[in-house]
């Protein structure tokens, strides 16, 4: 079912532009319908950049074929919001601004919380051109220029996406996206040579090299502007070069060399760690894994290899430090990876505006990676993202990918609210306040002070203090009656030593370590006195109670906006906020009880903790 235009941030898009129109012509018509006197001038040398100039009573938009489109959407947004367009030239901060779909061909989405895939169903392509065209316009409107359609965990029949069996369908969908400046990426199975008849996938075997050269030639005969491949190798039971005693530079370079003659890139995920860890073994520390697997390989990768590094060293937890690998490997091209799908941050049920997280990461990095990627929060739900307000994360991600360090998450949120609910929306300030506080609220009732992974195994929604504590995934907090947390200092696992010296010194001392990450970096006693005079245990209690109260306030605020929202939107949001309160209460009660049972120390304020 195609989303109605008023349900997302593109209210100005006309519904009657003929399909024979190019996207640029569509934009020209839409500008005309809004009363804009605007001329679009293509200058190919500008590529993705665009320049808006005042021309009498109107405007001229210059840019490459994609840049003109980006400029037109920017002008449309400004006009709809009643703002003055920013004249001058603008260009994106990142070369590749990617979205990674984790869609499986059976129609399900791994860690998807907005319905099923709008690409696949019943192990085949199943998509509506109208919806894909609308999706292309959504992406172009916020500057995203590449997507991978299929899950990085590649299983049959998705491994056939780069064979003649499915390439005709890949071509059809690439043709639709191309018009909006969006290039396709294919997630490939590293062991495809074995699947298709060879007895090995060893990257140094000449037969394997010849296989990939032939296969890549075939793919580009169907999709000549394919962006490239995305690979998850030697990670969570996926095949990779370690199977053949080869390192990841040797494994990645095999595919990169096959792609290079066609201008393709090889995006290689650095999410590699020991996922069969013995919880008894304190010498293995999962956050160290990415750095240990890759840092020593700096300078050994082909220049069309992009190492895709998660923003934190664990796995998209509520609060993590920046991955130390993002500070390392100056001779290697990198992409930073975020997760719009709220796997550990409320699953698009609990409200969680992500821009504050991104600001923390960007503010810490002295130089940004050249590319950026995010796991999508999209599905075939009518509102695209399950929770209507989760659309703000997708829009803001696109804006951040364009603006880089100049990204203003507050202004972008203001724009999204105006575009989605109308420039005259009477509850703008209330909704803005709700969304800007949402990350802090969620953190308080779930994973305060840097604790992570205390979630229900497999589903990852709701609390389970020891759900992963004795499992093999390497995600431990090792709580007992006196201490909680893992010592990652130079006297502990040594993880902190992976950071540049200044950061390592900051994190190494509990007195200077940022308190919100204290229990990520250190193993601390419950009676440790925080900077405000509270004990650490009392801080844990207080945060959980406060988080619950703030979740209840979010529900009250939503109910107060009933008069300003369409009934369908209001009722949909109401159900989400009611579920969020139940989730917050469950977290508050279970986590406070967990620590009380260890310590037998009651809440200093006398609030109810169940025993």
Image (cartoon, rainbow, N blue to C red):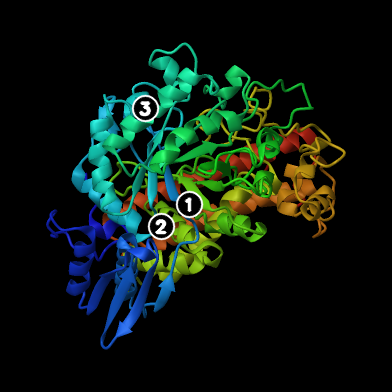
Nearest-to-viewer mark from 3 and 2? 3
Nearest-to-viewer mark from 1 and 3? 3
Question: Which residue in the protein does label 3 denote?
Answer: 215
Front residue (pair 265, 180) = 265
Question: Which residue in the protein does label 1 denote?
Answer: 351
Apparent side of residue 83 relative to residue 481 in the rendered image (left or right) = left
Determine crowd level at label 1: few under 14, some 14-19, many 20+ residues with C-alpha closer than 10 A.
many
Q: Is residue 377 above or below residue 91?
A: above
Q: Extreme bottom residue here?
A: 56
For the N terminus, the quadrant is: top left
On the image, the x and y values in percent for residue 298 come to 66, 41
Mark 2–mark 1 distance (CA, rounded to whole Å) = 15 Å
**Residue 79 location, quadrant:** bottom left
Determine crowd level at label 2: few under 14, some 14-19, many 20+ residues with C-alpha closer than 10 A.
many
Q: Which mark is residue 395?
A: 2
Apparent side of residue 606 relative to residue 337 in the rendered image (left or right) = right
Front residue (pair 228, 124) = 228
On the image, the x and y values in percent for residue 319 come to 63, 48
Taking the image as drawn, is residue 76 in sight? Answer: yes
Secondary structure of the residue carrying numbered label 2: helix
Nearest-to-viewer mark from 2 and 1? 2
On the image, the x and y values in percent for residue 540 come to 71, 47
| Contact flag, marks 1 and 3 (Cβ < 8 Å) | no
Q: Is residue 223 above or below residue 9?
A: above
Taking the image as drawn, is residue 113 in sight? Answer: no
| Contact flag, marks 2 and 1 (Cβ < 8 Å) | no
Mark 1–mark 3 distance (CA, rounded to whole Å) = 44 Å
- The residue drawn where x is 41% and y is 22% is 211
Nearest to N terminus: mark 3 or mark 2? 3
Nearest to N terminus: mark 1 or mark 3? 3
Nearest to N terminus: mark 2 or mark 1? 1
Secondary structure of the residue carrying numbered label 3: helix
């Amino acid at each position: 079912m195609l989303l109605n235009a008023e349900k997302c941030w593109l209210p100005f898009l006309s519904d009657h532009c003929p399909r024979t129109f190019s996207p640029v012509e569509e934009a020209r018509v839409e500008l005309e319908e809004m009363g804009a006197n605007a001329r679009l001038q293509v200058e190919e040398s500008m590529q993705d950049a665009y320049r808006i100039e005042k021309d009498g009573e109107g405007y001229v938009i210059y840019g490459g074929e994609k840049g003109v489109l980006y400029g037109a959407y920017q002008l449309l947004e400004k006009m709809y919001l009643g703002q003055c367009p920013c004249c001058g030239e603008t260009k994106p901060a990142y070369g590749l601004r990617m979205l990674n779909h984790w869609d499986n061909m059976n129609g399900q989405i791994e860690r998807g919380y907005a319905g099923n895939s709008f690409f696949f169903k019943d192990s085949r392509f199943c998509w509506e051109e109208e919806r894909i065209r609308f999706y292309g316009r959504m992406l172009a409107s916020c500057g995203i220029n590449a997507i991978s359609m299929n899950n990085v965990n590649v299983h049959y029949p998705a491994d056939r996406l780069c064979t003649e069996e499915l390439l005709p369908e890949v071509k059809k969908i690439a043709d639709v996206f191309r018009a909006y400046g969006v290039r396709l990426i294919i997630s490939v199975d590293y062991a495809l040579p074995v699947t298709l008849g060879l007895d090995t996938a060893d990257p140094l075997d000449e037969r394997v090299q010849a296989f990939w050269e032939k296969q890549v030639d075939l793919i580009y005969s169907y999709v000549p502007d394919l962006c490239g491949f995305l690979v998850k190798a030697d990670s969570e039971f996926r095949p990779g070069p370690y199977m053949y005693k080869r390192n990841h530079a040797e494994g990645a370079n095999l595919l990169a060399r096959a792609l290079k003659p066609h201008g393709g890139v090889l995006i290689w995920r650095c999410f590699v760690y020991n996922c069969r860890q013995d919880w008894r073994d304190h010498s293995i520390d999962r956050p160290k894994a990415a750095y240990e697997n890759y840092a020593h390989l700096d300078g050994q990768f082909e220049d069309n290899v992009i190492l895709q590094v998660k923003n934190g060293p664990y796995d998209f937890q509520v609060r993590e430090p920046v991955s130390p690998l993002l500070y390392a490997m100056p001779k290697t091209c990198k992409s930073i990876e975020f997760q719009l799908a709220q796997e550990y941050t409320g699953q698009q049920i609990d409200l969680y505006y992500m821009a504050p997280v991104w600001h923390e990461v960007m503010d810490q990095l002295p130089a940004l990676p050249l590319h950026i990627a995010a796991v999508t929060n999209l599905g075939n739900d009518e509102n695209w993202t399950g929770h209507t307000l989760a659309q703000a994360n997708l829009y803001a991600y696109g804006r951040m990918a364009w603006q880089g360090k100049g990204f203003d998450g507050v202004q972008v949120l203001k724009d999204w609210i105006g575009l989605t609910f109308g420039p005259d929306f009477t509850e703008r300030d209330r909704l803005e306040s709700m969304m800007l506080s949402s990350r802090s609220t969620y953190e308080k009732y779930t994973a305060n002070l840097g604790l992570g992974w205390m979630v229900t195994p497999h589903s990852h929604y709701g609390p389970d203090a020891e759900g992963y504590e004795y499992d093999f995934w390497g995600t431990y907090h090792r709580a007992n009656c006196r201490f909680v947390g893992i010592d990652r200092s130079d006297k502990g696992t040594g993880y902190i030593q992976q950071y540049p010296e200044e950061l390592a010194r900051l994190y190494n001392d509990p007195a200077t370590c940022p308190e919100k990450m204290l229990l990520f970096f250190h193993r601390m006693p419950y009676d440790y006195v925080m900077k405000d005079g509270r004990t650490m245990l009392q801080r844990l209690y207080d945060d959980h109670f406060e988080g619950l109260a703030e979740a209840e306030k979010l529900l009250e605020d939503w109910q107060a906006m009933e008069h300003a929202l369409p009934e369908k939107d209001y009722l949909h949001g109401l159900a989400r906020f009611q579920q969020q309160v139940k989730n917050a209460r469950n977290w508050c009660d279970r986590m406070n009880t967990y620590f009380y049972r260890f310590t037998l120390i009651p809440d200093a304020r006398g609030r109810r903790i169940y025993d």
